[in-house]
Amino acid sequence: MQDLINNLSASVIAQILETAFQWFVVVDQDAKIIYINNEYCQFLEVKREDAIGKHVTEVIENTEMHEVLESGRTDIAAPQYIKGTYMLANRVPLVVDGHIVGALGSVIFRDMSDWKKLSSHVRITIEQIEATLRHFPESFYSLCDIKGSSNSIKKIKETIAMIAPTKLPVLIEGEIGTGKEMIAQSIHGLSDRSDHHFVKINCATIPKELLEEELFGKWDVNRNRWKKGRIQLADRGTLYIEEINELPLPLQAKLLKVIQEERVQPVDTDKEIPVDLRVIVSTNMALIDQVKAKLFREDLFYRIQAITIHIPPLRDRIEDLPELVETFMGKVCAEAGRRHINIDRKILRLLQTYEWPGNVRELQNVLQAMVQLTNGEQISEEILPIYIRRQKPNFVLGHGTLEEILFEVEGQILQQHLNRESNKLKVAEKLGISRSTLYEKIKKHNL
Ligand SMILES: Nc1ncnc2c1ncn2[C@@H]1O[C@H](COP(=O)(O)OP(=O)(O)OP(=O)(O)O)[C@@H](O)[C@H]1O
């Protein structure tokens, strides 16, 4: 690196610094300006010779360069208000032999319109890239993408590994957003059918009158050819039928025939076409109740239920939440082009006491919104949706010794009281402890 720099003459370096799109300022370890480019000086309306040697705070409004020197932190695209406009600035400490010897500041966007112009350009480019990517297969989940260390998730992963190589039908039961499709994809991915298609159909989203044609195909009289249904498209691969409970009874009989005889009879023909597929079905209600209510055929139920994977709702395996949060935060921050954002114990505890009716998908959406609403590197409590902040008690019994569990429960009780009542004296009275004990506990629990 040093050699490469040595190849550049001082005048070339000066040109780079003076003509780059960015504005630069360099300070020494005492935060005194040792370099500032001409364009930046013009904008600040200062003479360069006057600026050099001055403390950076005397020359640049709202600067944080001196703080970067003290903390050693790096600020990327930090908004800074200068001369009536918001700019985006980078601030980086300069380190030699492990010591901070100064800092480099650069203004990357000079005002909001610059910034908006670039962001619309970036949006268009992203759309073009995404359009190109759409020609490639969709991203596919595998076993290692299923996060969680609760006994139920461990058991589910073991079951997937055991049954994947077989051709047996699988029934996946779980509330919305619990990961049913992920599991279906993982089974397909681990099977010897993975080189063929994973075809999905959702019985609740396709109008009932079109479902038969969509699933079983049709003989197109006008064109004198087959319009393949999803069953045929999944030949040699896997057919994943979502919300099977919505499949009308006559079509249930037809599906049973496909599973038992491995032949499909498209609409408007007597002809039967051989198919080789594995069927995975899912439902977000207990299918046996549908059978009892005569809404689901008993014979089809017994044909598909031999291997049933039941995914418990997130609230019943809340010990999985920290790992899910960690995974999604990493993913969401990377997608948003942000550095890692921390979630402290207090926020995590609030997330763990919420019921999550939309399960893992809801958690993912909440984290996504929280990242978008956060400027810094730490999520603050106010950013949490109000319904999560103001929830009813729901104690989380985590793993650990009795002492650890009691400590966890104590933290949750304190948190819930403090959410509802800001007057600490009243909280202490309600809990029958002195104010100083309450303060000690707040400190101990980092609330
Ligand atoms: N255990 C898990 N680990 C990691 N991500 C998960 C897990 N469970 C669910 N997800 C994520 O949650 C989202 C919803 O998962 P998926 O679509 O598989 O759920 P589903 O049960 O099929 O939902 P629905 O019934 O609403 O169609 C996906 O983005 C998925 O990646």
Image: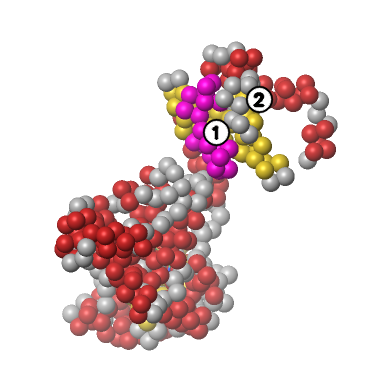
> Which residue is drawn at the image coordinates 55% and 50% (left, top)?
133
Q: Is residue 233 magenta?
A: no
Image coordinates for residue 148, horizontal then vertical, percent: 44, 71
Q: Please give left or right for residue 347 compared with residue 355 in the image.
A: right
> Which residue is drawn at the image coordinates 47% and 69% (left, top)?
146
Q: Quadrant of residue 435?
A: bottom left
Instruction: Name the foreground residue: 381 vs 31.
Output: 31
Where's the C terminus, which quadrant? bottom left
> Which residue is drawn at the image coordinates 44% and 81% (left, top)?
155
Residue pointed to by mark 1: 66
Instruction: Please tell me whether residue 104 is drawn above or below residue 141 in the rendered image.
Output: above
Ligand 1 lies under 8 Å from the Cβ of mark 1: no
Q: Please give left or right for residue 439 compared with residue 106 in the image.
A: left
Instruction: Please tell me whether residue 197 is drawn above or below residue 131 in the rendered image.
Output: below
Dot 1: within a 10 Å radius of its alpha carbon, few (fewer than 14), some, or many (20 or more) residues?
many
Image coordinates for residue 427, horizontal then vertical, percent: 19, 59
Ligand 1: quadrant of the figure = bottom left
Q: CA distance from mark 2 to mark 1?
A: 13 Å
Question: Is disc 2 placed on a helix, strand or loop?
Answer: strand
Q: Please give left or right for residue 91 compared with residue 112 in the image.
A: right
Instruction: Name the foreground residue: 426 vs 307.
Output: 426
Kindly identify the amino acid type of the residue bearing the numbered disc 2: Ile
Is residue 313 in view from this perspective?
no
Residue pointed to by mark 2: 34
Label 2 or label 1, whichever comes before in sequence order: 2
Instruction: Name the foreground residue: 388 vs 361.
Output: 388
Where's the N terminus, which quadrant? top right
Q: Which residues are magenta?
A: 56-78
Instruction: Name the foreground residue: 175 vs 196.
Output: 175
Dot 2: within a 10 Å radius of its alpha carbon, few (fewer than 14), some, or many (20 or more) residues?
some
Image coordinates for residue 224, horizontal then vertical, percent: 44, 61
Question: Is disc 1 placed on a helix, strand or loop?
Answer: helix
